[in-house]
Image: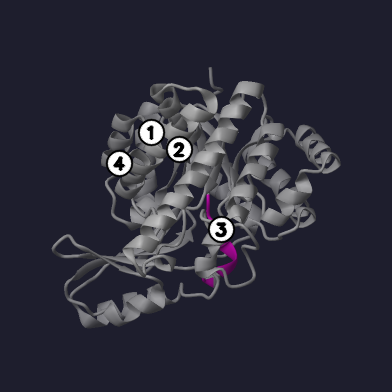
Amino acid sequence: MVTAYGHLTYCTNIHGGETWEDHFALLKTHFPRVKEAVSPHRPMGIGLRLSDLASQALTADAKLAEFNGWLADTGSYVFTMNGFPFGAFHDHVVKAHVHAPDWTTIERLQYTKRMFDILARLIPGGMDGGISTSPLAYRHWYSDTPQQWKEMRRHATMQVVDVTGQLVRIHREQGKTLHLDIEPEPDGVLETGDEFIAWYEKELVPAGIAVLSKQFGMTATEAEQALKTHVRLCYDVCHFALGYEDHAAVMNTLSRHGIQIGKFQISAAIKAAMPADAEARKAIGRAFMAFDEPTYLHQVIARQRDGGIVRFKDLPHAEPALFDERTAEWRSHFHVPIFLEDLGELKSTQSDIMQVLTMHKAGRLTNHLEVETYTWAVLPEQLQLPIADSISRELKWVIAQCADKRDCRKKLI
């Protein structure tokens, strides 16, 4: 929906399916119910997730026309898409394969360019549109040698530049501003705000200036501006909270470099302070391990009492370190409902969302707000609710946070 702080929606990666027919059927089942609950009288945007297989089907003129007709009939529109998961995302083991194929492959390049062709045909006039994507690759696939690491980054960066060229052409030919939103996450090649900004300035900008200047006859300044228009950061609040990052510091550094935030993915992780008492730690360990399930990676990032950080690839990898006396806090990569802060023995990183939204309200840092809790089906049973009700409750919670100082539903001027 259009709010005073941007377009607000939820990411449809919460719904299963891999074919377009499955995607569309689930949209028609769930989205109208959510819209009726949170935006019954105004248009509402969709954060569309398409698998590679579904994206191939939706390039057909007849299918795209049918979808556009449904959007018009339901008072809906598409302004952001999720191009991170390439294949099936539910009901089978995903784990690190969520990154596959990564940005070193032609498959990832073709999929992303196809998604932008679709978005260009869906997005209403006057809006910018974004597609979030993998932080280049899963870092542990390329950690054997420094040369392997360097070559992977070079090749992935050049493919991002290739997509940028496509977006420049779309802007010149159609007047539409579309952007690729890189999403740092635990164990991604780009894992933190600092890593993303360093890659952007030291690798993406030089490579992009060389290619875009030659391809479009741009000056170096024009080429850099094109990059900073069409390649942005997907700021997943859960991921930044997991790394104990200083949100204000990250956003100030982005601003200094002129790097834009493509969208906020509004999401929460689980956390707990680690007490000295052994029995209390054991209870916290049991609470964390209740979230251990076989579908997704649930990395743990432990903050040490001296301020250091220790990273574990998944919850079972962290379990042996539960009684490390040097550890002050655990946080784990499990997207929990954003309207919950108290989970019993554990807490959520909801306060990070509130901090980010406060900064966003003060400075309008992006046009796109997308709630992303995709783990409903694998949550502990006591946290599971009907999907449409859960999504609606999350969106209403965001609206309530926005309404602290002024009405978040107010139309943009």
**Cβ atoms under marks 3 and 2 closer than 8 Å:** no
- Relative height, residue 57 to residue 4 (above, below): below
Q: Nearer the viewer, residue 10 or 167?
A: 167
**Tag 4 near tag 2, CB within 8 Å:** no
**Residue found at the very far top of the displayed protein:** 413
Picture mark count: 4
Q: Are marks 2 and 1 in contact (CB under 8 Å)?
A: yes
Query: Which residue lies under the disc numbered 3?
Result: 374
Q: Main secondary structure of the magenta part?
A: loop
Q: Is residue 90 magenta?
A: no
In the image, 283: left or right of 130?
left
Kind of residue at disc 2 = Arg
Q: Which residue is mark 2?
A: 232
**Which segment did they paint magenta?**
372-380
Question: Residue 64's spot in the image, x, y percent?
Answer: 79, 40
Foreground mark, 1 or 4?
Answer: 1
Q: Which mark is residue 259?
A: 1
Q: Measure the alpha-carbon separation of dots 1 and 4.
A: 11 Å
Q: Is residue 277 visible?
A: yes
Q: Is 375 one of the magenta-colored residues?
A: yes
Q: Secondary structure at mark 2?
A: strand
Find residue 250 and name its label: 4
Residue type marked 3:
Tyr
Instruction: Please report whichever mark, 1 or 4, sits nearer to the chain's N-terminal start.
Output: 4
Residue ID at (53%, 25%) = 216
Q: Position of residue 320 (x, y in %)?
A: 30, 82
Give SS at disc 1: loop
The Cα–Cα distance between marks 1 and 3, rounded to whole angstroms, is: 27 Å
x and y percentages locating residue 274 in the rendered image: 24, 70
